[in-house]
Image (cartoon, helix red, strand yellow):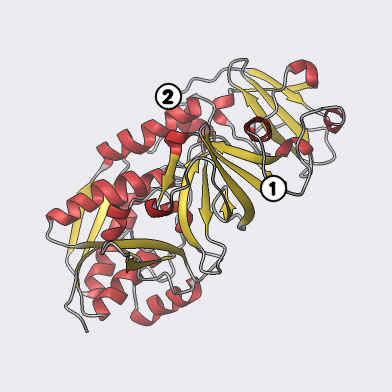
Amino acid sequence: MDKPLNIAVGLSGGVDSSVAALLLKRAGHNVIALFMQNWHDTAGTLHGECEWEEDKTVAELVAKKIGIPFYFVDLSETYKKKVVDYMFNEYEHGRTPNPDVLCNREIKFDAFLKYALELGVDYVATGHYCKKEEFVNDDGKTVYRILAGDDKNKDQSYFLCQLSQEQLSRALFPIGALSKPQVRELAMEAGLPSAQKKDSQGICFVGKVDLPVFLQQKLRPREGDVVEIFADFYKNLENFHNETGMKEDYSACELDEMSSPIIYTPQCGKVIGRHQGVQYYTIGQRHGLNIGGHKESIFIIAMDLESNTIYVGEGQGHPGLYRKALKIENDDIHWIRPDLEMKDGEKREYLVRIRYRQPLQSATLFKRREGLYLVFDKPQRGVTPGQFAVWYTQDGIEEMLGSGVIA
């Protein structure tokens, strides 16, 4: 084999990172385990106890079983500043953030990576289901690529959509070519203590939370109306774009029109209940309003922060849940592959997802001076401001090229 690498594995106590460490150790590399604590407060968590303590114990046992040194680092202050405070701020302004994406960009592959490098390693490995490749371009520069994991049911490339070339140069993803059952089997065969540990849920490093209770730590409840919008409202709406099909090109006005959410007022529908504050909810949500009297579930289709009003519609197929296009502001566009960055006036066809585990959707990207517009072949359900839209190549390899915050 080539010269052994010095690698720190972000050992979380879960089975995925455990098997990542196992594989690297078996390959003959110099591996250390590094467990990070990012959260202390249990307010709003559904377990009521610090899960990290149990995770740390399991991680230590895994490291001992594999035969690698174990280190601990407390990054909770950085995590609060870079992830949790950002999260509260986004919810306060009526947007729905993705803390897992921020955690990877700001913590795992920034603060955590810097600490690991100080320990003398050259790379950080994680248990993400994705793959990394590299090539040397015509200028002699190494270019790094993120590819979707082979297990399409577990592909986690989406969560790495904000990484830079510099961060990728130090990253390793040892289990990207494996399926979840294969990972479990390897862990069982090796007798790893994490072999049958359930996957973590909820907010990265915080755990499963009662979101309103969690957010009430900083965001005070504020009662407002829940207004139901009926399907008939859309029949005479001139600028409602839920039609299928794709034009060759669009004017800037058409792109702005299609990507802008509908503006509702209470007069557009009927008040059917009350809520505790728009900051506790998100587009597409169907639980938590506790409003009955409908044959089908009601879904949140829009929120007005200024008037503190939530708008809902009945049924999965309610037209207010769907949008044909979305916009990403220039400052929020991120290219994992800067060499492929789109110039103003360009358009390209890519595969896109607007949330984790959503099947990839065909879309055309239009770069304009005003921003980047994503126009889908078919209208998309639950386009949510604050979430990340991510685009991939259509060549069957599914390389993730870039991402951006939905405006």
The residue lying toward the viewer, choosing from 218 and 304, is 304
Mark 2 and mark 1: span between their CA atoms? 47 Å
Do the residues under discs 2 and 1 have CB atoms within 8 angstroms? no
The one of 121 and 164 positioned closer to us in this rendering: 164
Q: Identify the residue shown where x is 63% and y is 15%.
A: 307
Q: Give x and y (percent) for residue 337.
A: 40, 54
Q: Nearer the viewer, residue 299 or 40?
A: 299
Q: Nearer the viewer, mark 2 or mark 1?
A: 1
Hey, which quadrant is residue 273 in on the image?
A: top right
Q: Quadrant of residue 139?
A: bottom left
Label 1 secondary element = loop
- Vertical placement of 37 versus 286: above or below? below
User: Residue 222's spot in the image, x, y percent?
Assistant: 57, 17
In this rendering, the answer to whether 34 lies above or below 80 is below
Count of marks placed on residues: 2
Residue at (20% x, 75% y) in the render = 29
Look at the image and tell me whether residue 49 can be seen.
no
> Three-letter amino acid code at disc 2?
Lys
Q: Which residue is mark 2?
A: 218
Q: Residue visible at 49% across and 20% down?
A: 220
Q: Is residue 56 left or right of residue 48?
A: left
Quadrant for the C terminus in the image: top right
Secondary element type, mark 2: loop
Task: Say few, some or many: other residues with alpha carbon within 10 Å of mark 1 (under 14 / 14 to 19 / 20 or more).
Answer: few
Dot 2, how many residues are within 10 Å of its Cα: few (below 14), some (14-19), or many (20+)? few
Residue 248 disc label: 1
The residue under the point 46% across, 60% down is 199
- Which percent across, then down, holds residue 155? 50, 63
Q: Is residue 11 above or below residue 191?
A: above
